[in-house]
Amino acid sequence: MREFELIDGFFSALGARRDDVILGVGDDAAIIAPDTQASVVCTDTLVAGVHFESKDAGGDVGFKSLAVNLSDLAAMGAEPVWATVNLTIPGFDEIWIRDFCAGLNDLALRYGVAIVGGDTTRGPLTITVQAGGRVPVDQALSRSGARPGQRVYLSGPIGDGALGLKVAQGDHRPRADDASYLLSRLRRPEPAIDAGRALRGVATSAIDISDGLLADLGHVLRLSGGYGAELVVSSSWFSSPVCRYVEAGGDIGVLISGGDDYVLACTVDEADAGLFARRGSKDALPWVEIGRVVTEPGIRVRDPRGRLVDITVQGYQHF
Amino acid sequence: MREFELIDGFFSALGARRDDVILGVGDDAAIIAPDTQASVVCTDTLVAGVHFESKDAGGDVGFKSLAVNLSDLAAMGAEPVWATVNLTIPGFDEIWIRDFCAGLNDLALRYGVAIVGGDTTRGPLTITVQAGGRVPVDQALSRSGARPGQRVYLSGPIGDGALGLKVAQGDHRPRADDASYLLSRLRRPEPAIDAGRALRGVATSAIDISDGLLADLGHVLRLSGGYGAELVVSSSWFSSPVCRYVEAGGDIGVLISGGDDYVLACTVDEADAGLFARRGSKDALPWVEIGRVVTEPGIRVRDPRGRLVDITVQGYQHF
């Protein structure tokens, strides 16, 4: 058996079995059954040396390559259905590839995602995953519905990704359990699928925080018509390990500007805030209100005493 | 404006405008309207130095990166609808990227394909395109329906890709018009969308010849139950430039085993051969009958005088 067929064999056994996948791995293309809901598709590429390190565990890379895509589906309010995996590898490292597949499979099974196809090629280590999902036609979330006066929420803590990267790079050395938590959040981020689904019909906009809160909320405000936001930073924005970093004098800017968080930011009309809060409690979703949309462009972050926080880092730069 | 936003701007203007694309480039994901037909998805990665050369014109690379995917849709009998484009580039070369987009756009417009999303990242030059299409649920073509006694057809000439590569590498120096034709077939292959659609309801299996006729027909025969094929090679298999190569003593093996052709091979039941021929004439599709499926495994190629052709090359090896 040729090596690429062996790899294709690995992929054919991955992910959930679903009745709506008519044909999966192994043909020229996959076939998904018709659906009354809209189809949602997204894709992200992870490059070794840019988005992860070549020495990183295959399982973490496999997990994250799918997670970042499921996070994009979550930001649309979509339920994931299928994914394809394109793996470009310098050579046939069976242990790494099996580990990659195991990490991918772990997350795919958790969210019922069928792995329906992909491509294996030789070249510099690069992974492209595409994910497909579905959402009722009129309930998809977009980036363009924020309006002045609306409240801004986060689906979970931010800063874990940026601080996790500092731990991975040896620039932050917290106590062992914090290090473990932060590295886990960096390497195996949990896509906010449930949170995204809970936003259907109530959020006016949503985005996932992959490039940093300031950059991503900035996208929303720009696409919504050129608005701004007034945010009040507090410990409720952060996990305990990040709070300990801040309390020890750590820079808040890197937490607010850093990427790799994969929580959702959303805007909700004032009139729907009650409904939103009740839904959050019912589903045990830890929404955190972080501020308001305002007419004046630009994002201003203040501390609880009203002082402007100086944010110099400006989010992940692709080039 | 940041460079990656500039690039995203290039992509937002590409491809066809379609009523069934609810949301395209620029959000976390794209949204496609529900459809009564099944969805078909495929993806292929092209790596510089493996599938093309870094010095190749951006327009050709853009065209081909979509073409190889549309060819996979064609092999399912599907009509293309949308595509996403993930471009990993070592740096911001605006001229190359604009040319890439122009080549991609050229093909996308020709087949009404909307470019709905993608990702731009920094890294070794690599392109992953994913394409989505649709086909009536019960009419999709697969690789697994070939049965002994059925006829085997090609939707067009093979060997152009392999001989085009020889021209590109300086190993074959034909007359100028032949060189131009062969290079064009290598760099801008035409996906057999119309041929694939014409196979709905009549072909028992179909595949696109991307890895070479022997390898790809071999996939069909293996997935169909372990059958074989008896083929009779003749000039009808080849374009005029390839025929001239063969007449001058060129190796037939490389033509039959070489990849990069993107024509379809299909099998048709004897009882449907008349219907198939009539459809082909009506649609001006140049189907070429090349042999029969047989019970005995393995593919045997004979010349018109019945002598076995020795095929030593065994198709494109991914690793």
Image (cartoon, coloured by chain):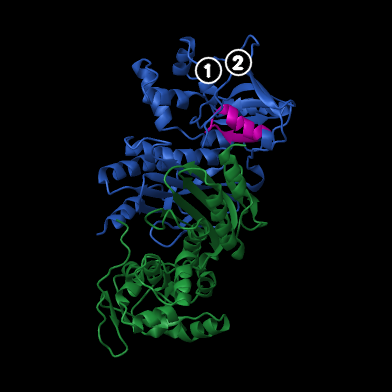
Chain colours: A green, B blue
**In this picture, is A47 found above or below A161?**
above
Mark 1, other Cα within 10 Å: few <14 / some 14–19 / many ≥20:
some
Identify which amino acid the numbered label 1 is placed on.
Answer: Ile
Mark 1 vs 2: CB contact within 8 A: yes
Mark 2, other Cα within 10 Å: few <14 / some 14–19 / many ≥20:
some
Say whether residue B121 is left or right of residue B310: left
Chain part drawn in magenta: B205-221
Residue B222: % across, % down:
68, 34
Q: CA distance from mark 1 to mark 2?
A: 8 Å
Determine which of the numbered discs, if any, sits on residue B252 in the image: 1
In the rendered image, which quarter contains the N terminus of chain B? bottom left
Q: Give the residue number, with chain letter if any, for mark 2.
A: B309
Give the letter of the chain under mark 2. Answer: B
Determine which of the numbered discs, if any, sits on residue A85 in the image: none
- Rendered residue at 55%/58% (across/down): A104
> Which element type, helix, strand or loop, lies under badge 1?
helix
> Which element type, helix, strand or loop, lies under badge 2?
loop
Residue A119: % across, % down:
52, 45
